[in-house]
Amino acid sequence: MGRPLRTPEISTHEESPRELSRGGQIAVVTGVLFGTFLAALDTSIVGTAMPTIVGQLGGLALYPWVFSGYLLTSTTTVPLYGRLADLYGRKRLLVVATLLFLLGSILCGLAQSMPQLVLFRMLQGLGAGGIIPVTLTILGDLFSIEQRARLQGLTSAVWGASAVAGPTVGGFITDTLSWRWVFYVNIPFGLVSLLLIGLALRERIARRPHRIDYAGALALTVGLALLLLGLLRAGEGRGWTAPDVVGSLAVGTFLLGVFLRVESRAREPVLPLWLFRRRLIGVVFTGGVLIGAGMFGVTSYLPLFVQGVLGGTAITAGTVVMPFALGWSFASTASGRIILRFSFRAPVVVGMTAMLLAGLLLQLVPSRAELLWPVVVAALFGVGMGFSSTAFIIAVQNAVGWEERGIVTALVGFSRTIGGAVGVAALGTVLSTAMRSRLGMATSETSSNALLNPELRAALDPAQLAALRAALADALGAVYLGILIVVVLAFALVVLSFPRQPIPARSPQVTAPESEGE
């Protein structure tokens, strides 16, 4: 039998959250905002430039892997960054993550082929996996709940603004300069973030021996990578019985089982399993997986309706994503105020209700040939994400000490991304199966491409075009029903199980243990 699960003994002491001077706090927050802007801009700016990139570099078959490769590496490294930040300090890990991201950005701009671009995007993802969770953890270390509630709204507003601006900025840069500058533009933001945080942030880490759980880290990273690879391949239409899909899922699942066994025996595990014994963290993680599936499902398959069924362009489809980002930003700001006035639970319930309403209205979209309904659904889902995600992050940070704050912060985003990867792949299988049942195996993919290509769409016979649009609308109806089921499960779990955790009269901050001689 393995060793009993217990929290490792780490000596800490409480200090004032205002250990930094006012100028130091401003510098750190500004650096965090630059890092947030950097990560958010990259998620939305690249897609606009990709058609031009493919036109110059070729390799259309590798188009989805520019995004999938980034997703694989950025997702699988999140828990590792969170744990290492708890062991070695936030500043060191943020510097490493940002430098990796900037190196990947430079190499992406220099890429001479699509295979090179995919490889360098994966390097970018290795850095991106640490930027957001570590910067959020830094805010959790330095500021009280009251301050964090306000700052979280600010960081979410920056995220939303950059996500909205990304497609426009990407198009402008690609048209006026070069697609390569879509990657080079990351460099000044990353350097400013490094400079501000590097100079202003002072951490005092206890000098004590660490036994890094390399076996657990390797099993987690490779297991998740194979699992996501199998899901992504299945979502591309290869089917769940393809040898590469079955092999990736089987080996990935086996390695995750090995990871759980290793973690139960490790002295300093990458992912402390005892955290999930705490009701709040268990609910937030499980709810995050379901919410992530719904969120990525909405943002992935609403634009498909706009372009394929309504006949819109990529710019028109972007008008659906914009209300989602704006709703998230607005609700995040309001969420902080609600937390301070009522409790963590209040904005969570409001957010889950908004997402449930969005899921119900989503069922009307396939039968209504209007842009209004997708816009309303996206905005409502964004509002729900803004209210709930802010409360999730601040609640879990408040529930642990310094030595666990990095990993629990990382788990919030990690759960959403994992849920999104699984959800989008599963919903993609639902879509392709539904299209094949309506159009036949041979014509479903060709017909779908014709609907999404303005030139091919214009050449279709009106009766054929109407039939294809009806088939896609019906198939998307099945996808939207799947999203509703996931949202209902998330609503039931979170609303019924999220603890009624009161806000402390004065929020104590537990900062890094002080080392001798510093």
Image (cartoon, rainbow, N blue to C red):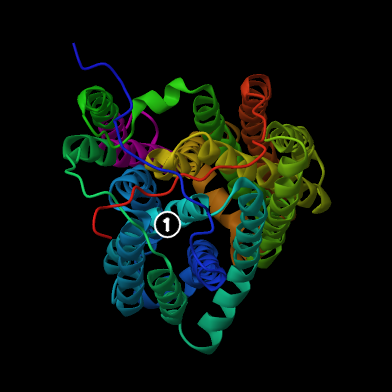
Question: For the residue labelled by badge 1, is the local secondary structure a helix, a strand or a loop?
Answer: helix
Say which residue appears at 45% left-offset and 74% top-offset: 196
Q: Is residue 263 above or below residue 133?
A: above
Q: Left or right: where does residue 381 sit relative to residue 4?
A: right
Q: Residues within 10 Å of mark 1 (few under 14, many from 20)?
A: some
Q: Where is residue 512 shown, x and y percent of the image? A: 37, 49
Q: Is residue 356 above or below residue 516?
A: above
* Residue 165, quarter of the rendered image: bottom right
Q: Nearer the viewer, residue 265 or 471?
A: 265
SS majority, magenta: helix
Say which residue appears at 46% left-offset and 84% top-offset: 178
The residue that label 1 is drawn on is 67
Whether the magenta-drawn stretch holds residue 412 is answered as no
* Residue 67, quarter of the rendered image: bottom left
Q: Nearer the viewer, residue 516 or 73?
A: 516
Q: Nearer the viewer, residue 505 or 299?
A: 505
Q: Where is residue 147 shown, x and y percent of the image? A: 63, 54
Q: Left or right: where does residue 14 sit relative to residue 170?
A: left
Kind of residue indicated by mark 1: Phe
Give the extent of the magenta segment: 223-249
Q: Is residue 35 above or below residue 359?
A: below
Whether the magenta-drawn stretch holds residue 228 is answered as yes
Quadrant of image for the C terminus: bottom left
Would residue 78 be visible to someone looking at this image?
yes
* Residue 439, quarter of the rendered image: top right
Would residue 297 be visible to someone looking at this image?
no
Quadrant of image for the N terminus: top left
Q: Where is residue 481 shown, x and y percent of the image? A: 67, 30
